[in-house]
Image: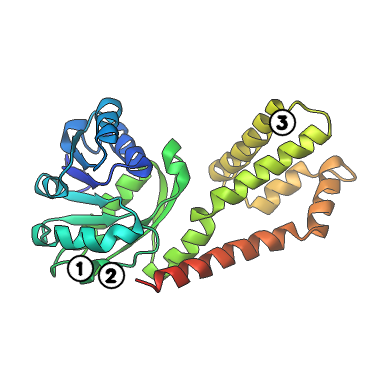
Amino acid sequence: MAGENLKIGFVGAGNMAEAMMKGIISAGMAQAEDITASEIMPGRRDYITKTVGVRTVSDNIEVIRSSDVVVLAVKPQHMGPVLEELKPYLTGAHLLISIAAGVRISFIESHLNLGVRVARVMPNQPCLVSASASGFALGRSAKKEDKETVQSILNSVGLAFCLEERLLDAVTGLSGSGPAYIYMVIEAMADGGVLAGLPRDVALQLAAQTVLGAGKTYLETRKHPGELKDMVTSPGGTTIEGLRILEEAAVRGAFIDAVEAGAKRSEELGGKN
């Protein structure tokens, strides 16, 4: 299925859905005319039609009828009622992809007829700029080609890994919550630049570009982060002095604890459905 000209539908047309639609079209997985999105807000429908070029409707059922792959892009608290609405129309011919945070595959499958192929995705906010880091898991009826389809869709807006569902809580703690931690790093580094005399706008751009550049350097060289760190750290220089301060403040341990805490909280929230 991944290599075919897919008919793709979106139930919900929020920011994440918009980003995925743009990525799918840009990657050539589907043409704009092959994508249908449902949205209850008329203004949002008009916006998506004008900016993305896809067909928008107010009826969720129309999305199911015109799609092979259906992306559920609704809020977690709305999943139950939406699944019940869609249940009579979803069959084994459909691949259903949920991007609702914390909603487990067992919950989704319990609201559907047997045989519907399900995938659960944990994307993250940089999907909005085609730089997402995602994890996904497959339901009991999913096929090999479904894995390829989901992988291709997510790769169109970043990178993704197929994992056991139990590991999606760890993905949530790391890449799901992680952007907020990095925004804090950017803000704090910029504050340091301002303290040292830089204009605020310059400091923010330097800090953000530094984060972008460091991440890109790792992804393209695949050198261990410790090795890359050592390459920047000269004996008796400025970087080792800064690293000493960070180690004394236990910043490394704080990041580890933050990711673990986010993963545990995701597990707790997931247990409620």
- Vertical position of residue 257 compared to residue 38: above or below: below
Find residue 21 and report its horizontal and vertical position in percent: 29, 38
Between the C-alphas of marks 2 and 3, the distance is 46 Å
Quadrant location, the C terminus: bottom left
Q: Earlier in the sequence, mark 3 or mark 1?
A: 1
Contact (Cβ within 8 Å) of mark 1 with mark 2: yes
Query: Is 87 above or below relative to 224?
Result: below
For marks 3 and 1, give the CA distance: 50 Å
Classed neighbour count for the residue bearing mark 3: other residues with Cα under 10 Å, few (<14), some (14–19), many (≥20): many
Residue at (47, 66) in percent of width and height: 266
Which of the numbered marks, if any, corresponds to residue 185?
none
Q: Which residue is mark 3?
A: 203
Q: Secondary structure at mark 2?
A: helix
Secondary-structure class at tag 1:
loop
Q: Give the quarter of the image for residue 100.
A: bottom left
The x and y percentages for residue 271 are: 40, 74
Left or right, residue 237 beside residue 212: right
> Which of the 4 image quadrants contains residue 233?
top right
**Which residue does the image show at 76% across and 61% down from the upper left?**
250
Which percent across, then down, holds residue 177?
A: 53, 55
What amino acid is found at the position of numbered circle 2 in the picture? Phe
The quarter of the picture where residue 56 lies is top left
- Residue at the far right in the pictured view: 236
Picture disc at residue 111: 1
Mark 2 residue crowding within 10 angstroms, few (<14) / some (14–19) / many (20+): some
- Residue 260 lies, with reference to residue 159, above or below; the image says below
25 lies above or below 256: above
Residue matched to label 2: 107
Amino acid at the residue labelled 1: His
Locate residue 210 relative to residue 144 in the image: left or right: right
